[in-house]
Structure formats: C-alpha cells, structure tokens
Image (cartoon, rainbow, N blue to C red):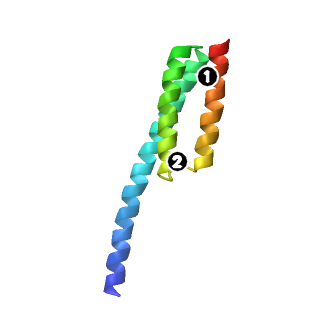
Amino acid sequence: MAQRRRQSLKAQRKDKKRHTKNVQIKTAIKKSLKELQAALTSKNSDAAKKCLRAVTSKLAKAAKKDIIHKNAAQRKISRLSKRVVTLTAS
C-alpha cells in the first residue's frame, strides 16, 4: 500500500507540472490570436502576416504536443490564413 501512495503522489506532482505548462502555452496562443485580431481589424497586412506566422507556429507546436487537438489547430490555421489572404487581396 505504501508504494501505491508514493506513486500516486508522484503522478500528482507530474500532473501539476504538465497542467501549468499547458496553461502557459494556451495563454501564449490566446495572446498571439489577440495580436492577430488587432492587426486584422486595423487592416495592417504586414503585421497580420507576421502575427499569422507566429500563431501558426504556436498552434502547430501545441497540436504536436497534444495540448490541443490537431484538427482544431489545422482548422484555426486555415480560417486565419483565409482572413489574412482576403486582407492582402483587398
């Protein structure tokens, strides 16, 4: 019984570390998305392209590490790319 308790305590410590790391990554993604949204509303195509590159990278890395689902990441990247392309076309 004692070993099970020790293992469960270690698992709890690991879960807590993983949770804080995942929250940090999700927060960084949200901040990047807000920056991109601001660039899109101000119709600044250069800033939008730069922000899109950063957001795409963060979403892909999060999907690779299973922080968010890969299809959700691809869907967001696709929709954001479409918006940036329409901004640069007009």
Which residue lies at the image location 44% right of the left edge and 50% below the top edge? Answer: 22
Residue type at mark 2 is: Ala
Quadrant placement of the N terminus: bottom left
Q: Going by the picture, which residue comes out furthest to the bottom? A: 1
Residue 81 pos. (x, y %): 61, 28
Number of residues whose C-alpha sits closer than 10 Å to that of mark 2, classed few (under 14), some (14–19) or many (20 or more):
some
Q: CA distance from mark 2 to mark 1?
A: 21 Å
Residue type at mark 1 is: Val
Viewer-closest of 89 and 11: 89
Residue for badge 1: 84
Image height of 16 relative to 7, above or below = above
Q: Secondary structure at mark 1?
A: helix
Residue for badge 2: 63
Which residue lies at the image location 58% right of the left edge and 48% below the top edge? Answer: 70
Residue 65 pos. (x, y %): 47, 51
Which mark is on residue 30? Answer: none
Number of residues whose C-alpha sits closer than 10 Å to that of mark 1, classed few (under 14), some (14–19) or many (20 or more):
many
Viewer-closest of 36 and 90: 90
* In the displayed structure image, the side of residue 90 where residue 50 appears, left or right: left
Q: Going by the picture, which residue comes out furthest to the top? A: 90
* In the displayed structure image, the side of residue 28 where residue 81 appears, left or right: right
**Circle count:** 2
* In the displayed structure image, the side of residue 3 where residue 80 appears, left or right: right
Which residue lies at the image location 65% right of the left edge and 32% below the top edge? Answer: 79
Which residue lies at the image location 52% right of the left edge and 40% below the top edge? Answer: 59
Quadrant placement of the C terminus: top right
* In the displayed structure image, the side of residue 34 where residue 22 appears, left or right: left
Q: Secondary structure at mark 2?
A: helix
Disc 2 to disc 1: CB gap under 8 Å: no
